[in-house]
Image: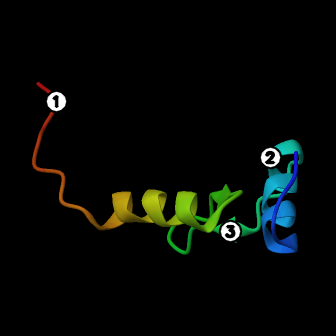
Amino acid sequence: KLYKTIAHVRGHRRVHSDERPYPCPECGKRYKTKNAQQVHFRTHLEEKPHVCQ
C-alpha cells in the first residue's frame, strides 16, 4: 500500500503490530490510535441514566 506521508505509513504500521501508544488517562487501557483513545475516554465522562432491569 502506498502513502503520501511518512506519518501515514507509521500510523498504518500499528495495524500490523501490537503497539498501543495511547493509554486512557482514566483506566489505562491502551489504543493504537489517538482517535480510538479519545472515543473510549468519553465513556468515562458521559452520564449513564439507563439502569438494567
Q: Is residue 6 above or below residue 32?
A: below
- Quadrant of the image occupied by residue 22: bottom right
- The foreground one among 39 and 10 is 10
Q: What secondary structure is found at the residue carrying circle 2?
A: helix
The three-letter amino acid code for the residue at tag 3 is: Tyr
The tag earlier along the polypeptide, 2 or 1, is 2
Residue occupying the point 65% across, 68% down:
23
Q: Is residue 14 left or right of residue 45?
A: right
Quadrant location of the C terminus in the rendered image: top left
Q: CA distance from mark 2 to mark 3?
A: 14 Å
The three-letter amino acid code for the residue at tag 1 is: Cys
The tag earlier along the polypeptide, 1 or 3, is 3
Image disc number at residue 35: none
- Quadrant of the image occupied by residue 19: bottom right
Q: What secondary structure is found at the residue carrying circle 3?
A: strand
Quadrant location of the N terminus in the rendered image: top right
Q: Which residue in the protein does label 2 denote? A: 15
Image disc number at residue 52: 1
Residue occupying the point 81% across, 72% down:
7
The tag earlier along the polypeptide, 2 or 3, is 2
Q: Nearer the viewer, mark 2 or mark 3?
A: 2
Image disc number at residue 22: 3
Q: Position of residue 20 (x, y in %)?
A: 77, 59
Q: Position of residue 8 (x, y in %)?
A: 78, 65
